[in-house]
Image: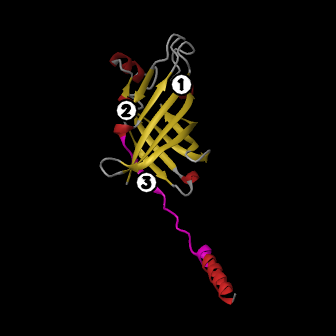
């Protein structure tokens, strides 16, 4: 009987000591975007007849991922406007013109997060400032963490998908609206490599 009480007391002290031990938290980790596996695809309605797409294929930036406190995570990205690809060279040139992105005067677009609202185990709404043609407006992206793991090179990689919408007229790029829709849908895929 006495042995049982002593054993229970010892177990209780062990559990208490364990609960008072400092908890190990992982530090936020910085990742650099892998531009060979990162793209922003955007689509629009062309007079109701079709829904063409184009994409930016060159992006650079960093992602700070805090797995213990995802709301403290942050992302900052720069896109090369001249990397735009619609699959039609002549149309690429039109998209780069002053009617739309004016790549000669504004060769890059940027996104910088300002808030992360966690919505699930692997999802979040990321609010940030999008700058196109020198105009900065807030935008909200629905983001999903696809996977964190090692690639075939042994590098730690974080992969994400995101969706969002914007009005191109907000960025002084509203030529031919409303026939060519003002509303633009975004579909983003990202791979980022741990530094």
> As drawn, which residue projects farthest toward the front?
1
State the SS at label 1.
Answer: strand
Mark 3 — residue?
Answer: 30
State the SS at label 2.
Answer: loop
State the SS at label 3.
Answer: strand
Residue 168 visible? The answer is: no
Kindly identify the residue that appears in the image at 47 percent across and 26 percent down: 42
Give percent across and percent down for residue 163: 53, 33
Mark 2 — residue?
Answer: 57
- Quarter of the image that includes the N terminus: bottom right
Drawn side of residue 167 relative to residue 6, left or right: left
Drawn side of residue 144 relative to residue 78, left or right: right
Whole-Å distance between the Cαs marked 2 and 3? Answer: 22 Å
Q: Identify the magenta region.
A: 17-34
Residue 63 visible? The answer is: yes
Q: Residues within 10 Å of mark 2 (few under 14, many from 20)?
A: some
In magenta stretch: residue 161: no
What number of labels is visible? 3
């Amino acid at each position: 009987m006495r042995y049982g009480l002593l054993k229970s007391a010892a177990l209780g002290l062990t559990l208490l000591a364990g609960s008072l031990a400092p908890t190990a938290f992982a530090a936020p980790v910085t990742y650099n975007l892998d531009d060979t596996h990162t793209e922003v695809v955007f689509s629009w309605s062309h007079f109701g007849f079709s829904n063409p797409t184009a994409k930016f294929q060159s992006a650079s930036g960093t992602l700070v991922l805090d797995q213990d406190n995802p709301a403290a995570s942050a992302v900052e990205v720069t896109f090369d406007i001249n990397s735009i690809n619609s699959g039609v060279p002549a149309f690429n040139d039109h998209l780069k013109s002053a009617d739309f992105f004016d790549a000669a005067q504004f060769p890059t677009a940027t996104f910088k997060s300002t808030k992360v609202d966690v919505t699930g185990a692997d999802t979040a709404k990321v609010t940030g400032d999008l700058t196109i043609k020198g105009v900065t407006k807030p935008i909200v992206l629905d983001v999903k963490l696809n996977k964190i793991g090692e690639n075939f090179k042994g590098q730690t990689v974080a992969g994400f998908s995101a969706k969002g919408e914007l009005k191109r007229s907000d960025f002084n790029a509203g030529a031919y609206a409303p026939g060519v829709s003002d509303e633009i849908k975004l579909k983003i895929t990202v791979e980022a490599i741990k530094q």
